[in-house]
Image (spheres, coloured by chain):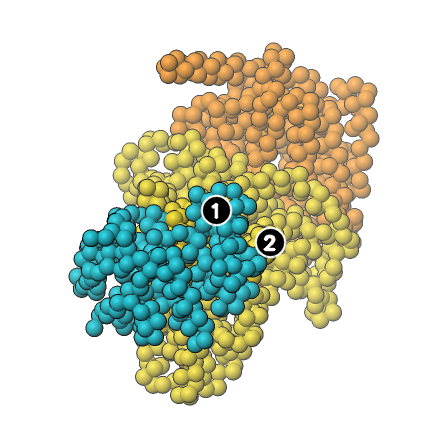
Chain colours: A orange, B cyan, C yellow
Amino acid sequence: MLTRIVAATLFALAALSARAEDVHPSDWQGVLDGARGQTVYFNAWGGAENINAYIEWAAGELEKRYGVRLVHVKLEDTANAVATVVAEKAAGRDTGGSVDLVWINGENFAAMKERGLLFSPGWAEALPSWRYVDHENKPTILTDFTIPVEGMASPWGMAKLVFFYDSARTDEGTLPQDADGLLEWAKAHPGRFSYPQPPDFIGSSLLKQVLLEKVEDPSVLQEPVVEKTFEEVAAPLFAYLDALHPVAWRSGRIFPQNYPAMKQLLADGELDIVFAFNPAEASSTIADGELPDTVRSFTFPGGTLANTHFVAIPYNASAKAGALVTADFLLSPEAQAKKQDPAVWGDPTVLALDKLDEEARARFEAIELGAATLGPDELGPALPEPHPSWMERIEEEWKRRYTAGN
Amino acid sequence: MTKKGLFLEGVTIALEGRVLVSLTCRVAPGEVLTVMGPSGAGKSSLLAYLGGFLEPAFTARGRALVDGVEITALPAEERHVGILFQDPLLFPHMSVAGNLMFALPESVKGRAERLRHAETALAGVEMAGMGDRDPATLSGGQKARVALARVLVSEPRMLLLDEPFSKLDMELRQQMRMLVFSKARESGLPVLLVTHDEADAKAAGGEIVRIGE
Amino acid sequence: MLTRLGPLITILLLTGPIAFGLAGTVLPAFGFLPVLGGMELTLHHFRTLFSQPAILTSVAISLTAGLVTALFSLGVVVLFVAGWAGTRLFGRVQHLVSPLLSLPHAAAAFALAFLIAPSGMLVRLVSPELTGWERPPDLLVVHDPMGLFMMAGLIVKEIPFLLLVTLAALPQVRLKETRMLAASMGYGRVAGFLLGLWPAVYRQIRLPVFAVIAFATSVVDVALILGPMRPSPLAVRLVEWMNDPDLSMRYLASAGALLQLGVTAAALGLWMGLERVGRIMCIVGVEVGVRLRRDALLRGAALLAMGLAAGAVFAGLATLALWSFAGLWQFPDALPASFTLKSWMRALPRIAAPLYTTLLAGLLATLIAGLLAILCLMREEETGRRPRRALMLLYLPLLVPQVAFVFGLQLFLVYADLLATLPALVLAHLVFVMPYAYLALKDPWYAFDRRYNQVAAGFGKGRWRRFALVRLPMMTRAVFAMGAIGFAVSVGLYLPTVLVGAGRLTTITSEAVALASGGDRRIVGVYAFWQMLLPMLGFGVATLVPALIFRRFRGMQV
């Protein structure tokens, strides 16, 4: 009797897992059916309330429309989710993993792809909403930090390095025009500039921006780091930092933990120039009452770092169907338009407006970007991200040089 | 040989090999045996032994029988040994009647019937109509009388008295002695009284055993 | 026999997770972690550990934090008790400080940060009028490299703890008589207490003091909020390594955890050295007969330190509450330009799940801990033994640094596929709630007049009925108080929640600390408010419910 129960259970489990393995967006109805009743653990950085609130909204819609329960696992660092999947693979847990969907790009995406930790073959380009995606004009959607995406992650939003200042305190005419100008500005305004302590994503991004501007031959950054030449290539960056730190906030003895902490310092008047990866960030924080409405944006005429952020599904996710439905919903014109609204989040869309129908386009056009947000034409050129190995290597070097600060 | 009453047969209590009490005696129903001795002599251990609460550190030999039943072979709750301490120890979370109903044997069925029993017992110690009171609001003498009524309604096989009068003032003490001993006689209970007050022993009128001297 | 199982289960619950956890930490530290292919024993990971940048600075910070926190908080408590015990003021301060005991460490740290940051409440209150500062000064106060503010954050939380354990030990010495005796010989209050009573009191609170040292040397949440960042204290770096996507960092983290164990042990060792110095000073003091008749200054300083510690936390909490309702609030305004419920409205839907987990884990852990504590106490009474060694065992979870064994425990939970499940979380919390539950019940348990039991047995009531109908009702207040303490401990747990909940089961505290990295003061304000509210609710229930149940009986009102 007992053996029969066990056998039946095993059979049922096998059937379940077989079904879970079989999902692919080419059979979308099958995905929708499989997703109903699933719980999707969405591992996403949880340090910003407006983003958390947006995910909360998405969870509500997903429950209502598709019967998918979305749970936001708030991460301090996306690397933690990668670590979880790595640990599960090491422990032989190839199904029933605890991460269903992860917000990802750059080094984490590269790491997961390289280790075969992603749901494959490519599924993103088979999602129903893919047909709206602007992959023709936004190359970072197909190539993330020099790594081909190959449909193993679905684009979620666009990011570009943008600086903010309070026009009530800082005169527009004095703003720096490039990395060198920023250093000069910092020397003229000691204690009023800083950057989040690497390996914070935003902080590391500033290091990459400086490296891109200062490096002799930018093309080496498109290839993996060559250890032999690293020191030489990175030398201008660290010379820059050595000059910056003495005039930085708290004399470079401590750094803000991340962007929101830096934003708070701008609000408090401790910093005068801060920067983010979301061009509409200032407008959305003004709308939240966290920053005064005199805050404005600027970028460097020579270009700033730009990339795309994605959602990806681990190879051992428990709720793959649910994760696919979630990824597709996040890509839908409705969700993308809401996301781009500075009053909600202000994250630029990955969709092409000319691929949308009348009604969807109207949604985007109705968005009030606000005085603090630069229009798409004012954002300046986009600089491509270096190969992810540069970020890792630079962070490591930063730690080596500056961990013991006083 | 009559089987009625309390019979202590070779009761020996020792602590770490040192014998504190060694006793063989008989107490007839309604009679009082008074055990006297200085503090630390083992009076309380004797009571604890009979009540079934001897600390594990003590060792005891011998046996005690009441009306032919070997109580020392029974767990504490089946011995039905009524105890009065120097404090009335009324349960503070029950009313006066509640205290009595708690003590009443389960054979008395039905709430109304149990309450009637309790009220009757209270009347027997001149506390009629006080059943609803919070024990904390009673005077010292009243508390002592409720404690007596409570132990009597529990229909014990015998009574153990652990210096029950020592905390009462002179006048009350005399009254309570009379009341307790007369009630015990009325109910035909063998009584073992532990005290260091000679007046208690005199009032009890029974045999006196001195220990630890 | 149920009671026989009590101590057995308790010992297993306390030592099991710690033993397994330590094993899961020690083995990888020496290179043994089969899942990652680590099969050979090697010291390589220790070499890597010691080649980490500024690792010795991290060690030094942790070590100093442990000793300074203990020395300072104990010092304030001793001088305060010595100088003021028995006065009316003492009672008032005691009432003021007691609620802080239930406040989670993280909330106290937030409170302090909000108060003393360069853009914090204190500077705002005096700016720009007194300071001329239109902008926050560029001063390195919070996150200072030496960790002074981290230690301050720890001290304000440990003072109430040590004060309470000292108060619990006081009834066992003859405070009043000794003071009169000492005064008659011409000793001042402080000297009389220190020379006459302190050695006996200290013996009783020695383990709690050790627990303070162990906690302060290995704290993570307070260090994240107030501690140095370049480099961070050892425990913070361990957690970073543990969370590194590169799994081979687990070896390093485990080696680091072992180092942490060593650091804590070293701190305890150094403390025992200090104890010896203190003992000699006491002996010399007695022999010389130091009277210290004019100790008003010392007494004043102790009172001031006590008041400052409590006052800072309360002012910080008020600031936190203010931030949670703030609209735009620019420097140097002392009040927000506008008030809004927006932060609360936005946080509330997302707070529901962590709130539920907090309540469930807290209540379950407390319930189980309470039951086990009662069974253990019953068993002790049965056997008549009150084992000293068992007490040491109870303190084990408080003496072994959390990071050192929760890591390894996490590994086992991953294998058992129990990570991030409620039973695992409850178990992890139980390990830390159990000691407090036992300690909270022990005194009232032994204070119970056992003659009530004998009286009830005489009425034919068996042991379980005696327990349920007599002892338990009479101990209602103590049981509820134990519940409130256990619940507060559970609410405040950070590291075990983060590691065992693995981000999927979150509590108010783990969420609050995670949000702290986001720096959004309004939302942190909301979460810290809940952190403060939950334990307070617990104590409110513990006060009101017994009073309500037994409102008719004066003997039950205390």
Separation of marks 1 and 2 at Cα, in angstroms: 22 Å
Q: Nearer the viewer, residue C392 or A167?
A: C392
- Relative vertical location of residue A4 with respect to residue C45 in this rendering, above or below: above
- Relative vertical location of residue B203 with respect to residue C144 in this rendering, above or below: below
Residue C342 position in % (x across, y down): 73, 45
Query: Judging from the image, what secondary structure is the residue with disc 2 in?
Result: helix
Q: Mark 1 vs mark 2: same chain?
A: yes
Residue at (60, 22) in percent of width and height? A37
Quadrant where the image shows the N terminus of chain C: top left
Residue B17 position in % (x across, y down): 17, 61
Local crowd size for mark 1, using a 10 Å CA cut-off: few (<14), some (14–19), many (≥20) = many
Residue C277 position in % (x across, y down): 33, 72
Give, as a three-letter code, the residue at label 2: Leu
Quadrant where the image shows the C terminus of chain C: bottom right
Q: Nearer the viewer, residue C453 or C417?
A: C453
Would you name the residue on which mark 2 appears?
Answer: C548
Tally of numbered tags: 2
Residue at (46, 81) in percent of width and height? C189
Residue C143 position in % (x across, y down): 54, 57
Q: Nearer the viewer, residue B131 or C166?
A: B131
Residue C191: tell me if it is visible. no
Residue at (55, 71) in percent of width and height? C91
Give, as a three-letter code, the residue at label 1: Thr
Residue C251's disc number: none
Residue C366's disc number: 1
Q: Chain of mark 2?
A: C
Local crowd size for mark 2, using a 10 Å CA cut-off: few (<14), some (14–19), many (≥20) = few
Residue at (81, 22) in percent of width and height? A359
Query: Judging from the image, what secondary structure is the residue with disc 1 in?
Result: helix
